[in-house]
């Protein structure tokens, strides 16, 4: 966790220096007179909650958005009032976007070499030249890939590599990485961090945006914190701790306590007996009782989500048994699981959990339509009752129930998603990565709800790749590795570091 | 070789099916595999292939166009009138007029799609009605038979007399078609503009962050289709030796079906010129074969519809879903 | 009072503003342009012309709401009409009894529903785009119809079929009553039932709906089946209006139905849109064409004006969103 910050801050002139950057979207100030500075060869972290203006700032630097008048961008000794993507690329500013911004239908070679052939005259494409550029870029990273295959054939981690390789094709002086580790496993993340160090050693400045605070501390020299579109401050990372960064980002202080309590002799709700599914997970056995919270953690690809979807009836186990309330069950679809009292909050709230364009009310009742039915017809009155009841109970702040769910913050959206499942009257609630895309400040609210639900007797399975989340909020923690149960931990009897050591081993 | 097959599965499948049909028809009819019939196929498919490669560019760019066929009718009419006004002209002038007017129609679509952010299917359904309604209203549905001589005289580029005395010939439409196919192929595979169109269709937001000029992409894609439909309009007028205002009405959906059969994807980013040509050819060969086999012409469309339906269903269904034996993931749904 | 207005507003929805404005504009412009416009003759002709297009438009609406399209609506209507015609011929043609007609209607509905079901099955079980599936179904159904009729007309039905197309009950044309019934049923299905709820939701994000425990395949199949059945109703009305059936009849309505849906505020990507605004949009379209007829233009000009109207409305919507964007900024 110690940072290798050894940069001489008073030394070289900044490679990039921004003054007085403001940007307004539809009446909301996304950025308000922000200054930002990056030194050559520095790894600089840009931190802030969702909506604090990080992405907007990157888009202004790279010319995707234009700042409001009065702004000044000094890059590499030259002053600009605004950027354009073409100038930015030509001058060596590269971005690895969070969503990668790659082209899945094109080959790996073309994805990597695309910008270096773009805009050159003659406007003709040379595939052999593109291949050469791509292979060169990949070999700089020490990676081998079939560059002639279309990108869509590769998994997300490989695509990440392609995005990095693309950023390294030009003479990069400044590289932005927007949440580059969000979809990587630990070993891939370590590999990426090595690349970042390599770039830094070669004199390339790297601006790193990540919500994983451990990484931030490990890799970066300095930290710029944005809060609500305003500059909070710039700090050398040597003096910082994770909780201090959280405080800076949210403006609040948090202290985590282990919530686990021993629960002897609880009535079992669900029991897994040697549950296996070929190629995904095998031989998983455990019981979750009434009021109990079982945490499951492990790296990406450990089979956590697959296990959850099997309990939810969306995948069929290849062997083993699921016992719910004392009776063996075999679900043929998720409706049967829901009717039997299993609810599953998807890890992908944006595309699987909620219907973003639709209303808050409709999102809340979609899984429990029979509950608002009056004969054959749906009752508007009962729908409104259900919605106002749940919004009150869970403390969801909404405008009108008819507003689109996308108008809510991540935290409030997640509360609606939880309410949607509570409305189905479940016995077992499976929460898969419930804090993804939820601000640090709002996460506590989610876990307060989870604790209250457990108190009321609900059995809860809490899945997360953030070890602290399961450590602080679950009664018992299952560690999964490659689809197998690697070990059990009791937060009351061990430290957070013990679990983290096991998970990241 | 295997790599080539994997990455061009649609084209390989289409060639396979075409070969099968070809072999079957050569064995069961004595007319199919004659020079005359093959040339005939080329000449009659020319107009549709020109339309198809134009539409392909729009589909690759992530759009759709319903209006191009009626736009071609309008182009035919305008070109015929313009040629009459300047007292005849020649092929070069004709193609320039038809092409330019076609580009204008394409740009009109692109203008609304880009500047008012209206989705292309809405714009082109509107312009479909505007173009066609205006054409029929202003012309009163009257056809033009009085075309310049050069336009109605078949231009034979190659001819061959078989032993039995029958002539087989390649005519100008085939040459123009080959030109359009080559030009489109060059555009989308060999120029950076073409690659940018593909990138834009594949991931519009990614393309925007790259600094690709989105407006230019829309105008080039729809302009290209406009150019192609202008040319196709003139070629069609040449082929049938008359200009009938509603002759091309309804052609848009047939061409769309053929292009998609050739592997282009609604939504953008995917599609090849080869596949697109094969898609059109598959339909013409089937029709030609049914004709030679003596099947009632009334049954053609039914059979072709069934073939397209089956092809689309099969190409969008993984083998493992049809044959559960291959399934290694026993998903519940 | 205010609650009544609020209820009315939630009943018609924000989609209503555009079509209603267009309706008022058309009424005003044509009453100035032609003194004969505001007459019972105009409304009579609208009332008789509206139903065919309207019923087909209802058939188009459901798939559009799910983010799809059913390009086979017109030919499905034709083939359903043919089914009814043949059933009556089987039972004696012009001498066929009402039972034969009733049986024919049931069979026509079944054929229409089957055509829709096939589209629905393919759309639900493969990743094929609904435009393509319904397009190939359209080519197939058109071919089937042309093959069976050899491209000709089928006519000679019992006399009692006539009133269904031309008769009136208390001054309201029967086809219009059928359309109104269709509109009412669609409105109730969409606003009040689980099927309608799920139809809208699927239009926004089908995977998220599946994760909510809804059998999305069943919903998609039902939507297209209902669409096909509504085509059959249109086919039956067309048969009685023209006293004949021909494949290709109403072909030009195909893209007009899509146009009317968009004009009625239906989201082209699916998920949003209501029946009543679409109904008003249909009335606007018919009034436009009747009005243009009165001042000496023909249907073709009306078609062009319909296209211009759609573009105009879409541009105005764009302007409206930009205007609210600017007013927010203050």
Image (cartoon, coloured by chain):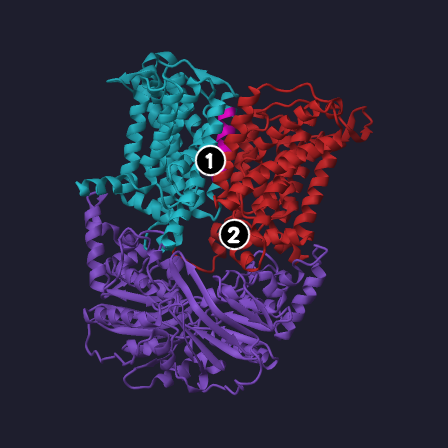
Chain colours: A purple, B red, C cyan
- Residue at image point 62% right, 80% down: A202
Give how far apart the Cα atoms at labels 2 and 1 are.
27 Å
Name, please, the residue furthest toward the left.
Answer: C1
- Residue at image point 26% right, 17% down: C171
Q: Position of residue C165 (x, y in %)?
A: 34, 18
Q: Which residue is mark 1?
A: C71
Crowd rating for badge 1 (residues with CA inside 10 Å; few <14, some 14–19, many 20+): many
Q: Please tell me whether residue A137 is drawn above or below residue A503 in the rendered image.
A: above
Tell me the quarter of the image containing the N terminus of chain C. Answer: top left
Can I make out residue A127 in this image?
yes
Eye-nearest disc, 2 or 1: 1
Q: Which residues are magenta?
A: C133-146
Front position in the image: C184 or A409: A409
Q: Secondary structure beneath disc 1?
A: loop
Q: Secondary structure beneath disc 2?
A: helix
Front position in the image: A301 or A362: A362
Instruction: Give residue B319's mark.
Output: 2
Q: Main secondary structure of the magenta part?
A: helix
Q: Position of residue C325 (x, y in %)?
A: 39, 51
Front position in the image: B63 or B287: B63
Pointer 2 chain:
B
Q: Is residue A15 left or right of residue C212?
A: right
Say if the magenta span includes residue B209: no
Q: Quadrant of residue C117?
A: top left
Q: Please tell me whether residue A208 is drawn above or below residue C180 in the rendered image.
A: below
Q: Position of residue A462 (x, y in %)?
A: 32, 71
């Amino acid at each position: 966790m110690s940072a290798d910050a050894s940069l001489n801050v008073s030394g070289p002139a900044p490679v990039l220096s921004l003054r007085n950057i403001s940007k307004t979207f539809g009446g909301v100030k996304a950025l308000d007179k922000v200054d930002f500075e990056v030194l050559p060869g520095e790894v600089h972290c840009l931190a802030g909650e969702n909506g604090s203006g990080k992405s907007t700032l990157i888009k202004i630097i790279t010319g995707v958005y234009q700042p409001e008048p009065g702004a000044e961008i000094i890059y590499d000794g030259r002053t600009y009032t605004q950027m354009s993507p073409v100038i930015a690329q030509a001058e060596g500013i590269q971005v690895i976007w969070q969503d990668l911004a790659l082209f899945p239908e094109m080959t790996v070679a073309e994805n990597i070499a695309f910008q270096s052939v773009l805009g050159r005259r003659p406007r003709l494409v040379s595939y052999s030249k593109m291949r050469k550029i791509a292979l060169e870029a990949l070999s700089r990273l020490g990676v081998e890939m079939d560059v002639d295959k279309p990108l869509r054939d590769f998994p997300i981690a490989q695509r990440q590599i392609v995005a990095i390789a693309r950023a390294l094709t030009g003479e990069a002086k400044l590289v932005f990485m927007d949440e580059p580790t969000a979809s990587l496993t630990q070993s891939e993340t370590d590999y990426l961090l090595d690349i970042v160090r390599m770039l830094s050693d070669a004199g390339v400045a790297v601006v790193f945006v990540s919500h994983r605070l451990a990484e931030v501390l490990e890799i970066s020299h300095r930290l710029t914190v944005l809060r609500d579109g305003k500059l909070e401050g710039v700090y050398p990372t040597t003096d910082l701790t994770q909780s201090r960064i959280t405080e800076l980002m949210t403006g609040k202080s948090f202290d985590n306590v282990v919530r686990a309590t021993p629960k002897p002799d609880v009535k079992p709700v669900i029991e897994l007996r040697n549950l296996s599914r070929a190629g995904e997970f095998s031989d998983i056995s455990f019981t979750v009782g009434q009021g109990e919270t079982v945490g499951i953690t492990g790296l990406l690809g450990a089979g956590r989500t697959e296990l959850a979807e099997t309990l939810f009836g969306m995948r069929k186990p290849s062997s083993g048994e699921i016992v719910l309330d004392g009776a063996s069950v075999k679900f043929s679809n998720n409706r049967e699981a829901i009717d039997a009292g299993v609810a599953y909050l998807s890890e992908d709230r944006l595309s699987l959990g909620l219907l973003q364009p639709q209303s808050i009310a409709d999102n809340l009742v979609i899984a429990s339509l029979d509950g608002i039915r009056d004969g054959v017809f749906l009752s508007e009155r009962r729908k409104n009752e259900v919605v106002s009841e749940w919004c009150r109970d869970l403390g969801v702040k909404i405008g009108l129930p008819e507003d689109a769910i996308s108008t809510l913050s991540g935290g409030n959206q997640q509360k609606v998603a939880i309410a949607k499942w509570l409305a189905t009257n479940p016995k077992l609630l499976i929460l898969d990565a419930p804090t993804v895309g939820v601000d640090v400040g709002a996460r506590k609210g989610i876990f307060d709800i989870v604790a209250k639900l457990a108190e009321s007797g609900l059995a809860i399975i809490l899945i997360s790749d953030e070890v602290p989340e399961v450590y602080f909020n679950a009664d018992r923690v299952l560690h999964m590795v490659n689809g197998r149960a690697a070990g059990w931990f009791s937060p009351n009897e061990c430290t957070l570091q013990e679990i983290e050591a096991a998970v990241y081993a | 070789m295997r790599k080539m097959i994997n990455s061009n599965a649609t084209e390989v499948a289409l060639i396979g099916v075409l070969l099968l049909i070809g072999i079957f028809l050569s064995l069961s009819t004595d007319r199919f595999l004659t020079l005359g019939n093959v040339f005939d196929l080329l000449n009659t498919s020319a107009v549709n292939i020109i339309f198809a490669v134009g539409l392909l560019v729009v589909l690759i760019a992530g759009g759709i166009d319903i209006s191009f066929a009626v736009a071609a009718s309008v182009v035919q009419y305008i070109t015929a009138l313009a040629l009459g006004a300047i007292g005849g002209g020649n092929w070069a002038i004709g193609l320039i007029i038809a092409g330019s007017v076609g580009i204008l129609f394409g740009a009109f679509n692109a203008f609304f799609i880009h500047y008012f952010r209206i989705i292309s299917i809405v714009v082109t359904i509107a312009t479909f009605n505007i173009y066609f309604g205006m054409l029929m209203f202003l012309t009163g549905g009257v056809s033009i038979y009085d075309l310049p001589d050069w336009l109605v005289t078949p231009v034979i580029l190659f001819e061959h007399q078989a032993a039995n005395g029958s002539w087989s010939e390649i005519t100008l439409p085939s040459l123009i078609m080959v030109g359009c196919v080559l030009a489109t192929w060059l555009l989308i595979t060999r120029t950076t503009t073409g690659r940018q169109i593909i990138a834009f269709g594949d991931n519009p937001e990614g393309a925007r962050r790259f600094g690709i000029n989105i407006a230019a992409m829309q105008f080039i894609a729809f302009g290209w289709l406009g150019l192609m439909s202008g040319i196709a309009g003139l070629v069609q007028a040449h082929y049938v030796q008359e200009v009938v205002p509603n002759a091309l009405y309804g052609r848009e959906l047939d061409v769309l079906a053929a292009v998609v059969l050739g592997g282009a994807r609604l939504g953008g980013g995917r599609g090849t010129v080869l596949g697109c040509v094969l898609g059109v050819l598959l339909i013409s060969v089937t029709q030609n074969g049914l004709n030679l086999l003596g099947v009632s012409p009334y049954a053609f469309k039914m059979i072709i519809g069934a073939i397209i339906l089956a092809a689309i269903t099969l190409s969008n269904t993984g083998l493992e879903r049809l044959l559960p034996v291959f399934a290694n993931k026993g998903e519940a749904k | 009072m205010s609650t009544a207005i609020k209820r009315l507003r939630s009943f018609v929805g924000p989609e209503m503003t555009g079509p209603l404005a267009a309706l008022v504009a058309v009424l005003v412009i044509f009453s100035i342009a032609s003194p004969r416009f505001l007459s019972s003759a105009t409304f009579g002709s609208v009332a008789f012309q509206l139903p065919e297009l309207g019923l087909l438009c209802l058939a188009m609406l459901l798939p559009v709401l799910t983010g799809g399209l059913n390009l086979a609506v017109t030919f499905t209507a034709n083939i359903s009409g043919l089914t009814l015609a043949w059933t009556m011929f089987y039972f004696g043609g012009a001498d066929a009894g009402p039972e034969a007609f009733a049986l024919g209607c049931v069979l026509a509905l079944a054929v229409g529903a089957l055509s829709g079901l096939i589209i629905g099955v393919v759309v639900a079980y493969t990743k094929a785009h609904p435009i393509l599936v319904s397009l190939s179904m359209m080519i197939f159904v058109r071919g089937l119809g042309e093959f069976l009729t050899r491209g000709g007309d089928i006519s000679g039905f019992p006399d009692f079929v006539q009133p269904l197309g031309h008769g009136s009950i208390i001054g309201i044309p029967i086809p219009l009553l059928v359309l109104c019934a269709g509109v009412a049923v669609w409105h109730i299905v969409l606003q009040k039932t689980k099927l309608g709820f799920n139809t809208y939701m699927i239009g926004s994000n089908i995977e998220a709906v599946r994760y909510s425990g809804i059998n999305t395949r069943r919903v998609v199949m039902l939507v297209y089946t209902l669409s096909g059945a509504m085509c059959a109703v249109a086919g039956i009305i067309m048969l009685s209006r023209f006293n004949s059936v021909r494949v290709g009849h109403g072909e030009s309505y195909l893209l007009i139905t899509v146009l009317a849906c968009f004009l009625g505020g239906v989201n082209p990507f699916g998920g949003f849109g209501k029946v009543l605004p679409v109904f008003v949009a249909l009335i606007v379209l018919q009034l436009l064409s009747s009005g243009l007829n009165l001042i000496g233009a023909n249907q073709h000009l009306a078609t062009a004006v319909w296209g211009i109207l759609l573009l105009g409305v879409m541009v105005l919507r764009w302007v409206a969103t930009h205007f609210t964007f600017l007013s927010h900024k203050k």
